[in-house]
Image (tube, rainbow, N blue to C red):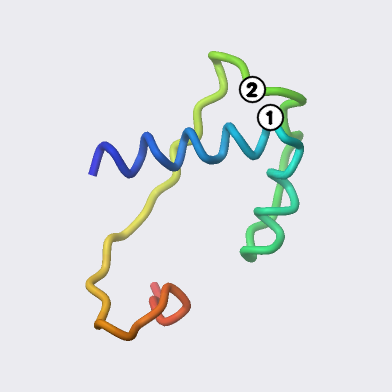
Amino acid sequence: MEDIGQTLDAMLKDLLGSNELEKFLRDHGWKVIGPVPVRPTKEVRFDVPFIPAMMGAHGSQGNVHQ
């Protein structure tokens, strides 16, 4: 579970560094409320809550609802 949090943090920092974070968030139904940092720094940390779910062999992420 810790690896998932670290992976999400690294992925979102990479998107921030390439100026693709806001588009990624919009494309996935998220809404940016405050200012987005211009570039990643050591102080920027993404802590995204997630709920693991079991998926069938033919399921997709779009089928998971909270």
Looking at the picture, does residue 26 appear above or below residue 54? above
Q: Quadrant of residue 60?
A: bottom left
Instruction: Return the disc, 1 or 2, that comes first in the chain's sequence.
Output: 1
Q: Residue at x 74, y 53 (%)?
A: 23
Residue 2 higher or lower than 29, as above or below: above
Residue 47 percent across, percent down from the top left: 44, 37
In the image, is residue 22 above or below residue 66? Answer: above
Amino acid tagged 1: Gly
Outermost residue, front side = 57
27 lies above or below 12? below
Question: In the rendering, at what x and y percent does residue 14 appear?
Answer: 60, 34
Task: Judge from the rendering whether residue 56 lies leftward or rightward of residue 11; answer left or right.
Answer: left
Disc 2, SS: loop
- Residue at left offset 36%, top offset 54%: 50
Q: Which mark is residue 65?
A: none
Which image quadrant: the C terminus? bottom left
Callouts 1 and 2 close, C-beta under 8 Å:
yes
**Residues packed near mark 1 inside 10 Å, few (<14), some (14 to 19) or many (20 plus):** some
What residue lies at 73% left-to-right and 39% top-to-bottom? 34
Q: Which residue is mark 1?
A: 17
Task: Say the numbered circle drawn on residue 40.
Answer: 2
Residue at the (65%, 54%) spot, across then down: 25
Q: Is residue 19 left or right of residue 7?
A: right
Q: Residues within 10 Å of mark 2 (few under 14, many from 20)?
A: some
* Label 1 to label 2: alpha-carbon separation: 6 Å
Mark 1 lies on a secondary structure that is helix
Residue 48 drawn at (x, y percent)? 44, 45
**Number of the front mark, 1 or 2:** 1
Quarter assignment of residue 56: bottom left
Q: Is residue 7 left or right of residue 28?
A: left
x%, y% of residue 29? 64, 65
